[in-house]
Image (cartoon, grey):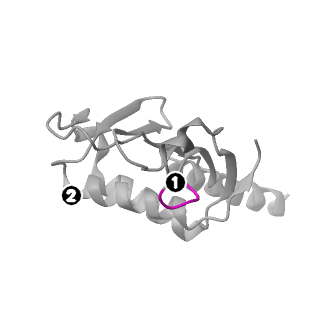
Amino acid sequence: MKYLFSLLAILGLMSCATSQNAQYSMIEYQAGPCFGFCPIYKFTVSPDRKAVLEAEHFNFTEGGTKDDFNKPREGTFQTTLSKADYDQLVAMVDAADIKTLKDSYIDERIMDASKNNLRIKYANGTMKDIAMSAGEKPQKLTDLQKFITELKEKQSWKKVN
């Protein structure tokens, strides 16, 4: 009985720690087209560190031509982020203080840049969307955007569709 109680206590503490770490139910970044050959994709990460890449065009090749837009989308890919990468991503989302940021950092004067969206779904069911383009935005948001792009590029993706 003593061992059973100890086991239940440890499991209870572990579940509390896990739920505290899972403050985000989803982190999603979407990069839209530009007037060139910018990668077009949606990158989604869940608390279990599973990542999904919905790749449209220019994610696995450099350069391109207008004809590439007529090709089928590149596909849907999956991977599991390392614990270190996931923890760094969460730390950067925390540091950016997403809830306090504006909903839009779109600079209408810059016409040829891609429009990007960051969507954070919190474990409590709330959500924050931030639309961005080139131009001024908080440095921590720029750093997060750069980290997500680099994180996407360094993964070993497995095509699922």
Residue matched to label 2: 139
Q: Residue furthest bottom?
A: 84
Specify whether 21 is left or right of 75.
Answer: left
**Residue 24 screen position, x and y as percent:** 49, 44
**Residue at x 36%, y 42% (from the top left corner):** 34
**Residue at x 30%, y 61% (from the top left corner):** 143
Secondary structure type for disc 1: helix
Other-residue count near label 1 (Cα within 10 Å), few / some / many at <14 / 14–19 / ≥20: few
From the image, which quarter does the C terminus lie in?
top right
Tell which circle, 2 or 1, labels the residue nearer the N-terminal end: 1
Magenta-colored span: 59-63
Which amino acid lies under the numbered mark 2 shown in the image of this protein? Gln
Nearest to the observer: residue 144 or residue 21? 144
Residue matched to label 1: 21
Q: Is residue 124 above or below residue 42?
A: above
The main secondary structure of the magenta stretch is loop
Specify whether 159 is left or right of 102.
Answer: right
Report how far apart the C-alphas of labels 2 and 1 lie in the structure. Answer: 25 Å
Specify whether 131 is left or right of 26.
Answer: left
How many numbered discs, if any?
A: 2
Which amino acid lies under the numbered mark 1 shown in the image of this protein? Asn
**Mark 2 vs mark 1: in front:** 2
